[in-house]
Structure formats: C-alpha cells, structure tokens
Image (cartoon, rainbow, N blue to C red):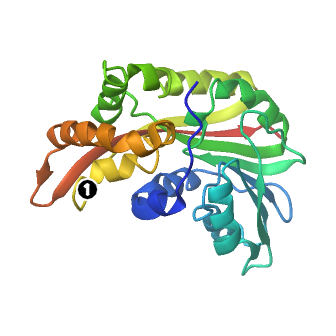
Amino acid sequence: MPAAPTWDPGQYLRHAGHRARPFADLLARVPELPGDPPRIADLGCGPGNVTAVLADRWPTAHITGYDNSPEMLDAAHTDHEGPTAGGGRLDFSHADARTWTPPAPYGLIISNATLQWVPEHADRFPDWIAGLTPGGTFAFQVPGNFDSPSHQLMRELAHSARWKDRLADTLRHEDAVLTPAGYLERLVALGCEADVWETTYLHLLEGEDPVLDWVKGTGLRPVLAELGEEAEEFLAEYRTALREAYPATSHGTVFPFRRIFAVATKKA
C-alpha cells in the first residue's frame, strides 16, 4: 500500500487553475439534483477551493467537504467554511474514503482526483450509491496517467538499486484506477444511468522544472513523506529524467494529462 502522504495545500494550489479544470468539466455533466435545498458531499475536498464552486451551481445547498488530511482541512476551514451567498452552507469534516459511509441521504456525492489514492475504491460504490436520494448523482474524476512518463520514471527510480529498499512498495501502480469500461460496468450493475468518458489535457506549464513542481503537490507526496530530508537526492535524479521526457520549449513545457470521468445517476 502507498505510504500515507503528508499534504501541502500551498504546493497543491500552485497549479490550481489546471487542477480545477477537470472538476469544471465533470460538474458540467451533472444533472439537476433532488432535494430543496440539496445536500452535497465532496469526498476528498482538499483545501476546499473546488468545493466552494459547488455553491455557485447550487446556491442554497448544504455542502460538506470530507478529507483525511489535517493540513488540507485546516486550509478549507480557514478559507471557505461558512454561509454561502445564496443562503446555503459550506462546511468541512474529517473522513477517510476507505471507510466513509454517507451519514444522511445526499443529492450529490462528488469526488475530484481522490479515488486513485483509495485501494479497491470501486468496492465502495455500492455504499455510496445507497447513500443517494432517488434521482441523486455520484460523480467523480480520477487521473488516468499512471502509464505516462511522469509516473513511469518515478516508479523506475523508486525500484532502482539506490532506492528500492525504501520505496519499492511506496508508489501506486498502473492499476490504481479502473479503465473507463470498468467503471461503466460497475456503475451500471448498481442500477445507475452512467456516463463515462476520458479526456487528455495538454497543460502548458511555465517556470523551471514545472512537471516536477506539479507532481510534488500530488503523486510524489508518498516519496517525500518516506524519505524526509533524504528526498533531495531522489529529486535530483528524477528532475533530470523529467527534463528529458518533458523538454521545455519557448512557449512552456507541454504536460499531457489523461483523466477519466464518470457521472452515475440513481434511478428515481
């Protein structure tokens, strides 16, 4: 199992614009919700910046963001918690997606770039679908880039002679997420009307070693947690490999990023 990462909200939010775009694309496919006002759960809310966007779509909703990172929840409480402009409410609570069960019926359970951290997360779908009100929706997006150079190089380095004793079992593998067809099969089997698709974004990143800067906020967190002060040696090797895999151009560094989306509506 991957090492438990320690999250850094500031590092994560350095690429907030690019990271928020898949959430907006997911949200655009979510239908109107049952309930007046609707009840919404954001599973894996992080620092709450995209959770707050839900209040723009459903101004009167009671929205709860759940996360298991104290650092992320502290940022969410500080920056986003409280009444919303439309008369709803936004709050945050500690929960682990591996064990979380809806405490009340929800019109929407949504998860943005979280489930890849949860082993066998598709086995949790029955409990989450059961926690929807009739006509409610379960929607999520996960990265589908575990076979991309950014992740392959990270795993290869972790399994090298220098690092394998410390890191061989630390990182997630290619099976961290299902295929789009696999998600569709699981959701339809639960009696949902499901819409599943994939998109590859070509993020144009700026700055020095921007791909390294990106993964330091997400996929590299278990390595940083495991190595502590020794991480600089790993980062030096990894940085060199990333520069070759993602060469800088006069316009920036192109970072292709595939993501998988699913919107499943429980039949009324």
Q: Is residue 198 left or right of residue 70?
A: left
Check the picture and name the quadrant holding the C terminus. Answer: top right
Disc 1 crowd rating (10 Å Cα; few below 14, some 14-19, many 20+) is some
Disc 1 secondary structure class? strand
- Relative depth, front residue between 268 and 117: 117
Q: Is residue 68 left or right of residue 141?
A: right
Q: Residue farthest to the left?
A: 250
The answer to which image quadrant residue 204 occupies is bottom left
Image vertical order of residue 5 relative to residue 173, above or below: below
Q: Residue at x 27, y 54 (%)?
A: 210
Which quadrant would the N terminus be assigned to in this image?
top right
The one nearer the camera, 238 or 142, is 238
Whether residue 132 is visible, yes or no, is yes
Q: Residue at x 81, y 60 (%)?
A: 38
Q: Residue at x 34, y 31 (%)?
A: 154
How far from the left and from the top, in percent, is residue 11? Answer: 45, 59
Q: From the viewer's perspective, is residue 32 above or below residue 151?
A: below
Q: Nearer the viewer, residue 170 or 124?
A: 170
Q: Position of residue 137 (x, y in %)?
A: 72, 45
Question: Is 220 on the left-hand or right-hand side of 238?
Answer: right
Task: Give the farthest residue toward the bottom.
Answer: 85
Residue most extreme to the front? 229
207 is higher (above) or lower (below) than 264: below
104, 238: nearer the viewer: 238
Amino acid type for the residue under numbered disc 1 = Leu
Tell me where residue 53 appears, x and y as whole percent: 61, 66
Residue 101 percent across, percent down from the top left: 83, 38
Can you tell which quarter of the image residue 54 is in?
Answer: bottom right
Q: Which residue is mark 1?
A: 204
Question: At 14% across and 45% down in the image, what residue appears?
Answer: 247
In this view, 241 is above or below 160: below
